[in-house]
Image: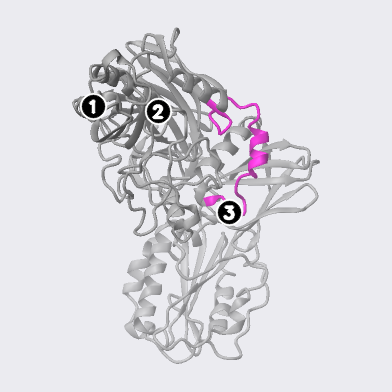
Amino acid sequence: MSPLARLLLACLLLSNPGSVLAQPEACCTAGTEEDDLSYEEPFFPCREDGRGQETEHRVEARIEGERAHLTVHRTFHNASPRYTELYDWLELPQDGTVHGFALESGGQWTEGTLLAASEAERRYEALRSQGTAAPGTSARLSAAGDGAALHLWNLPPGSSVKVRYDVRLRLGYDQGRVTFTYPLPERKYRPHGTCGEQDPRPVLTVAPPYPGAELLLQQVDNPLQREVLEASWPVKPFTGIDARAGLAPGDTGTTAFVQLRVGRLAEAPTRARVLFVMDASHSVGPDGIAEQLTFAGEYLRLLPDAVAEVVVFRRSAERLFGRLIPASEWKTALASLPAARLAPGNGSHLDEGLKIAQQVLGEGSGPVRLIAFTDGRLRRTYAPLPADSTTSAPDAAVHLRWLSSRVDKAPTHPRLSEPLIPQSCGLRSHRSSVESLVRPMAWEQVRLEDERGTRLMERETLLEGQGAHLWLPNLQTSLGRLVLHGQQWGCAATPVPVELDSAITADLGRHAHGWRATRFWTLNAKHGPPAPEEAERLASNGDWLSPTRSFLASPPGAGPSSVQTHALPGRLEGEAIPIGVLSGSLCGSSPPKSREAAPRFAKALKRLLQPAVAACVRGGRNPALQVRVEATGDELVDVEVTGAASESQATCVREATWALRLPALFDDGFAETYTLTPLP
């Protein structure tokens, strides 16, 4: 789930006070354990102030087959004078999965190991306890919604560490170009502008997918209006529809993933005969007539070797030129016509115009294109023409181009819903491109069927240059062959067999996980990813980051150390970082909450207090003496002494405690109360 989707989901919980949890300091975030997308830990995208700053974000991409392989390099610097712990949420590209992870500290690279998520967490928490080992930097990378949670332990003071992880994702296809995207740091959807504003912009470099490829890198918005870097390049030209599928049989059925890419569907006809049947009625008017003539000129520019004639209709129909003129003579022939020949008049006898057009088509030879224009205001007795061998030929098309009318919105003639000439192919369009009436540029009424003719998927259109990714879960176990059917210009197109692709089959588990994790906006789509349990089955032998598998990078000899690390608040004993929403304004921040003293802090404070208190107590023994200390971070704000042998002893202990200066270990900004028995 993207950060924006997670924010919106959280804010919907405002109406349910029972769902409100503690809000972390300074940042506005959201997430719940009841989220559709399981993840290991609550969502917490913002680094603590002063704990570390990302200074470099670099991405190297190479293309292998249908996948992009990204190697991501990120550098984090600890400018503070003490060891510290850092947490950051790393957004992944759409459909991306993480397949490798490494950590560099002090010039030494440590490759991460993929472990069960619970085991990786257990080992990481063990490193965070006190011990005798020399301090060393370790890292854990775990799944977190549509991204990854990075935990860095023992960042050295004044030093930088680097992480490197590998991401794989399936390439997209749109407008004849192969594409993939990479997310940019999110800024504009964070109401409290402190989070992420200083994150470096990723620098993306892409190795050319083939020699001479024209790569284009640009910033665009994805479907959730998130800013992303898009890399794209022209696909090598191909014709027809490239349809491929991967199949994964299961206990209850077959999961299939279908990839469709539409190439050039047809070529423009050569030496075509073009007939324009134009509406010259008063309801169209002079502007409508001029619009039709302009369209005809643009049409003939795409067919420079064609011949053409115009038939205009009012109460009767007539040929405009009296012959089929070459396309190159269009402007000259049109300019030589008297204005009265194109003046509007009464009557809208479209059928009369079609009859003359059929007669004209008896002249000469070559592919036929007949384009009829009308605003639909026809006489009651209008009827389509009988079928004709010329207009029903495989290389012929009869198109209807709707015009706007200058009169009121009266209903169009009901029989215009039928073909103008039966058994002919063609489009009925209002605003289709000129070229789409020259040659087929789309499939309509698309359906995917198995070998038995069972419909598995239906789609209204597939446009030239368009791609589609479709999941088909729980199909029949015996599924062996898929066929794509559709229409071109309203007539049946040649069926396209779907090729079973072993590479897609091998990638099904990875792709199912990546799709489900990073496509929150399509989870309810009709042909969305498999159910979580099916996706997990497909991914059972995967080698990528998931809710059940995490990476741990720990250098040789790493172990619990004695260094006083500036640990993240709320995680001193391994508890999860709290997260949620606060009722009121949109994701407003709540005041800091007090918490009970962590044993680690209490022990450290007792060691500080003992020398000072011992000087106030003769013999150094008073088991009844207790000191209650309240602190906000490294500042004492209240001291209370009980059990002292005398008032003077109580005063001495109180003043000695107030004189303490807490070290940076305590500097996490949380209010805490410690009740200590400093003496045996």
Pick the residue in front: 553 or 415.
553
Q: Are marks 2 and 1 in contact (CB under 8 Å)?
A: no
Q: Inspect the image, locate mark 3, and give the three-letter code of the amino acid beneath it.
A: Ala
Query: Mark 2 or mark 1: which comes first in sequence?
Result: 2
In what element is the residue under mark 3? loop
Is-magenta flag for residue 530? Answer: yes
Residue under label 3: 525
Q: In terms of secondary structure, where does tag 2 sit?
A: loop
Pick the quarter of the image with the C terminus. Answer: top left
Residue closest to the eye, 388 or 455: 455
Q: Residue at x 54, y 37 (%)?
A: 514
Closest to the camera, between mark 3 and mark 1, is 1
Name which residue type carries label 2. Answer: Pro
In magenta, the rendered stretch is 522-550
Instruction: Write down the residue under mark 2.
Output: 208
Q: Indicate the amino acid at tag 1.
A: Thr
Above or below for 442 versus 151: below
Q: Is residue 223 visible?
A: no
Quick one: label 3, few (<14), some, or many (20+) residues within 10 Å? few
Residue at numbered disc 1 = 657
